[in-house]
Amino acid sequence: MSTICAISTPMAEGGISVIRISGENAVSIAEKVFKPFTCESVGSMAGYTCAYGQIHDGGKTVDDGVLTVFRAPHSYTGEDVCEISCHGGIYVTKRVLRLCLDNGCEPAQAGEFTKRAMLNGKLSLTQAEAVMDTIAAQGEYALASANLTRQGSLFGRIHEVSDKLVKLLGELAAWVDYPEEDLPAVEETALRESLENAVSVTDKLLADCDNGMLIKHGIDTVIAGRPNVGKSTLMNLLLGYDRSIVTEVAGTTRDVIEESAKLGELIFRLSDTAGIRDTDDRVEKIGVEMAEKRLDECMFVIEVFDTSVKPDEDDIALLEKVKSLGKRTLIVLNKSDLESAVEESFFKKYSDDIVYISAKNRDDRAQIQKAAEKIFTPENYDAHSTIFANERQRACLDKANRNLKAALEALGMGETLDAVTVMIDYAANSLLELTGEKATEAVVSEVFSKFCVGK
Ligand code: GDP
């Protein structure tokens, strides 16, 4: 395999930049461009050691810096790796990169270092993907989940299921293909038990995946309520800046405004919708329909009411609708600065999570955060049981789960073991594709094409 190099730090001015070289000629190429002051030669450097020295082009100084040497297989890629840290200017960094290229390196492709790590057995495909998630993490939960996946938690959980399926397939194949041999029959009850177990584990994994999606992309949240209760004001309070138009005219928010707000460690994707009410205005009607659709799709509803007036039929219709949809909800009784005309007990019938706030008061943001954290942590939003999966992984898991369920159904309908085996085979293959143990070259290339160069 060729020896590759790339700039591993961002292309911007900074204190230092790192140029990474990996491959069998890494040390000899580094030797040509780096003259150590603190040891005899680059070639004599052991793994996990570094030296200060001159980065030079045929003897002419380019910069001074630090060289770190990693010896195969004890490196990120599993190959010999040298990392040159130079001053963090854009020109000087590119100059050092060119020096490495001129002395025998090939330019690395996007994600090629991590791809090599995978090919050399240092990482599974899921761990490689988690490297990308670690880089992209925007909060504590996201980082904790990515770290767990990187340490192999997802791989381990999937591997356990796929291992059992592969073993089962072996037994089934032996029994079906060699009926004349005196092999023990695959008991239908035992087979059913194994499949049920695999279905329940993959069901749980899928649910955990969905939690992971929430952490990664934010909780899909709708702010609902009839016009003029203060939804836009609340949206602005949560965002920390004025995004929605706030007016005293009912029905002003006609489209659906979407923004992300971070409350503590939780990210909410907020939709401030048109108030849901009966209306003859054609444009407002479209807004109301969009609001209802968003309500159907979302994960979490913040229901807003004006405490200074008694709940009317639109308010009750909203409460009933959200309740019937079974959504997680927070009831916000807004305009607490005005005299109250509502009974809390009335709202208690719809949710245990109720806050009194004035959306005009910045300090009340903390109350919403506290209430939201209670709803989403810790049991139902635990980073430690969460899988930080991506769409590819989820699709593989889903396919495996569907095939396992189909196999169970086929078994129940008295289909032949041959037919059941085919479905178990599909399920096992999907799981092996997920972990990368049986992923095609196309899948692997697709995964790494999303990486940055230098990683
Ligand atoms: P929306 O139609 O539900 O989006 O309501 P808006 O956010 O546009 O607010 C409607 C009106 O209520 C505006 O005049 C706001 O200034 C006012 N308003 C919003 N929140 C409060 C509050 O907490 N207290 C008081 N007194 N007025 C508020």
Image: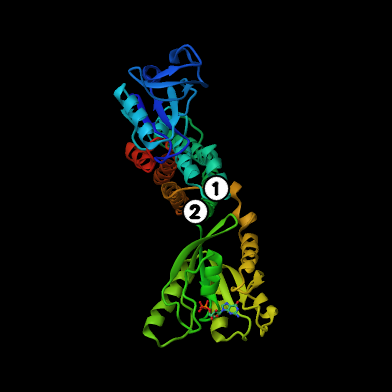
Residue 30 can be seen in this image = yes
Name the residue at 34% across, 30% down: 95
In-image side of 352 versus 409 (left or right): right
- Above or below residue 358? Residue 135 is above
Mark 2 closeness class: few <14, some 14–19, many ≥20 residues within 10 Å: many
Residue at the farthest left position: 102
Foreground of the two, 60 or 334: 60
Q: Position of residue 108 (x, y in %)?
A: 34, 32
- Above or below residue 428? Residue 406 is below
Name the residue at 47% across, 46% down: 136
Q: Position of residue 132 (x, y in %)?
A: 45, 42
User: Which dot, 1 or 2, sits closer to the camera?
Assistant: 2
In-image side of 156 versus 2 (left or right): right
Mark 1 closeness class: few <14, some 14–19, many ≥20 residues within 10 Å: some
Residue at the farthest bottom position: 280
Q: How many marks?
A: 2
Q: Amino acid at mark 1?
A: Val
Confirm or deny contact between disc 1 and disc 2 (CB under 8 A): no
Q: Which mark is residue 201?
A: 1
The quarter of the image that holds ligand 1 is bottom right
Secondary-structure class at tag 2: helix
Q: Amino acid at mark 2?
A: Met
Q: Earlier in the sequence, mark 1 or mark 2?
A: 1
Mark 2, residue position: 213
Residue at the farthest front position: 60
Secondary-structure class at tag 1: helix
